[in-house]
Amino acid sequence: MRASFTLILGLPLLVAALILPFVVADSYVVHSAAMVLYFAYMASSWNFVCGYVGQVSLGHAAFSGIAGYASVLLFTGLGLSPWIGMILGGVLAAAISVPVGYATFRLKGPYFTLTSIAFAEIMRIWLENTDEFLGIPLKGAQGLTVPPVGGTSFLAFQFDGKLPYYFIILAMLVGVMAATHVMERSRLGFYLKAIRGNRDGAEALGIDPTRYCLTALALSAFLTGLGGAYYAQLFRYINPERNMGIDLSIDMAVMTIVGGQGTILGPTLGALVLHPVGEMVRASLGGHVLGLHLIIYGVVLMLAVLYFPKGIIAPLQRWLTPASKTTAPQTTVTVATPKEVEGR
Amino acid sequence: MSTRILEVDGISKRFGGLQAVSPLSFHMAPGEILGLLGPNGAGKTTAFNMIAGALRTDTGAIRFNGRDIVGEKPWDICRLGIARTFQLSKPFGGLSVVENVMVGAFVRTASEMEARAEAEKVVDFLGLTAKACTDAEDLTAFDRRKLELGRALATGPRLLLMDEVVAGATPTEAQEMVALVRRVRDLGVSILIVEHVMKVIMGLSDRVIVLDYGKLIADGPPQQVVNQPDVLKAYFGERYVQVHA
Ligand SMILES: Nc1ncnc2c1ncn2[C@@H]1O[C@H](COP(=O)(O)OP(=O)(O)OP(=O)(O)O)[C@@H](O)[C@H]1O
Ligand SMILES: [Mg+2]
């Protein structure tokens, strides 16, 4: 039921994404579309843990930054292909996520969110103020550039046109969706939903919440890291603000929540709606009013939470698969007293 | 094989100024249905939570098949073979009936197929097959109770702790649940059952123990225990005992 809906909505979107760069070959359009895909990818990576356990992390940008810096530094310092650097960076982000998650996942709601912000902001501020660490040139707030190798080189993750970058991120997005699909159907997916639904009940059924939340977090951090490394290659530039700033974390969270948490396509829908809105606002007014796109996000978020608490994917699902509603058997609603009256 | 599947030896719990459970000792034989009775606030759920590892004990030991389980986490206790239901049934939202049961079945297998097959058996056992694909949150209160039992059963327990399984049920439903609990026992599962409804526990239990203000006031066969003055007093008050004496 769920899978078929994902296909009904997802396949046309995929086909559209595949032909778009050939219909509109304009490089600005292709670049903008790649950015939408990038945000869809990042939001999907965020959703991988947060959307399923129902905790809002606003620190995920740190994983993007860790892996982004790792991949750039391994390339500039050791000449390692960014493809390998990307994987290693992702692994590093996952490794760092585990102790951080261990310390924070026992916190609930706003406490978890606040500590996740603190973690990412400490990392960012440290990086912005560190020019060199253990002999590694980090160049603080100025950031690092990726030296061009000249022309197209697959190994060096450098291409002449925008098109290869577009298809790489599209493939990554399909990959993260496939990973989410597999996760949903696995023991891990069931356990995360159980923990979200009723933590005590989950514990009584043999589930150690910390263990499974951390597993999902590490996977999510790895995926987020890949996205961070991609971003650095796309712009051939990385700095703490853009690659690990709180704006990025907010983007991931808000896009997922608006689109639909805990679903395969929700984060992508959120990115499709919100990224263009944010860009338009930035382009028309952004120069004058800093952070205005965040205000617009706030408004969209409030509207979405008010009208589509399960995300804009919920009405689409109802509309596209009306059959799924009627298959539920008619249950007679009995007035259930929670507790029988004492004394007989 | 020990003749006691569960030995509770002087466990107690204090909440601030309230001694919710005073040092409490009892035991259970394999295959036994033991009823735990007591008025509101007697400490039944607290005792339960200590056995299930959801609450730390202040004192005492709990042995399951001879092994001390005090201090073990709830999920480890489940893995050892003790399952429980909660006084308030809360299904896992967004999952169907069979998927809820699968969560329990995943304790014994990592394979989705095996977990589903096991869960389907349990759902069938509960008589919920027709509703297997219903969202668990759309179930009636009584079906939720059955689902809660099914989730616990799917973990393959040797000992099942059940907290108030017929609360709010109609007489017909209560009968159905009693039959279900008997069938669970016939599978070789020992059952510790907390219940308010005297009639249910009388017919079902091999033996009952009674708590009042955290203290054990009776332990024995159901018919004998209900007629003890202490028990009548705890349940119906001093006057009832005097009038009927
Ligand atoms: N977490 C807690 N903190 C403080 N007091 C508690 C806590 N849990 C239970 N109590 C108190 O301990 C006493 C025993 O509660 P418990 O829930 O074990 O009773 P019970 O026998 O299960 O009652 P009921 O039949 O109402 O379910 C009650 O007075 C209750 O208010
Ligand atoms: Mg209780």
Image (cartoon, coloured by chain):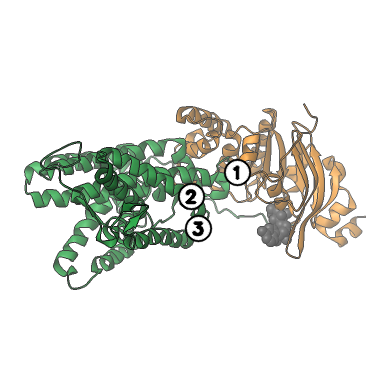
Chain colours: A green, B orange
- Which of pointers 2 and 3 indicates the residue nearer the eye? 2
Looking at the image, residue B45 sits to the left or right of residue B227; the answer is left
Residue in view at x 62 percent, y 40 percent: B76
Answer with mark 1 or mark 3, whichever residue precedes in sequence: 3
Q: Position of residue A72 (x, y in %)?
A: 26, 47
Q: The residue marked by circle 2 belongs to what chain? A: A
Give the distance between the C-alpha atoms of the residues marked 2 and 1, in whole angstroms. 25 Å
Count residues near mark 3 (Cα–Cα under 10 Å), then give few for <14, some for 14-19, many for 20+. Answer: few
Front in this rendered view, residue B13 or B208: B13
Q: Secondary structure at mark 2?
A: helix
Identify which amino acid the numbered label 1 is placed on: Ala
Looking at the image, residue B58 sits to the left or right of residue B101; the answer is right
Q: Are marks 1 and 3 in contact (CB under 8 Å)?
A: no
Identify the mark at residue A99; answer none if there is no mark: 2
Residue in view at x 63 percent, y 44 percent: B74
Q: Position of residue B7 (x, y in %)?
A: 79, 39
Q: Secondary structure at mark 1?
A: helix
Give the distance between the C-alpha atoms of the residues marked 1 and 3, in whole angstroms. 19 Å
Q: Position of residue A208 (x, y in %)?
A: 55, 43
Q: Are marks 2 and 3 on the same chain?
A: yes
Identify the mark at residue B135; answer none if there is no mark: none
Instruction: Say if B130 sits above or below B200 in the image.
Output: above
Identify the mark at residue A108; answer none if there is no mark: 3
Identify which amino acid the numbered label 2 is placed on: Pro
Identify which amino acid the numbered label 3 is placed on: Lys
Q: Is residue B96 visible?
A: no
Front in this rendered view, residue B164 or B104: B104
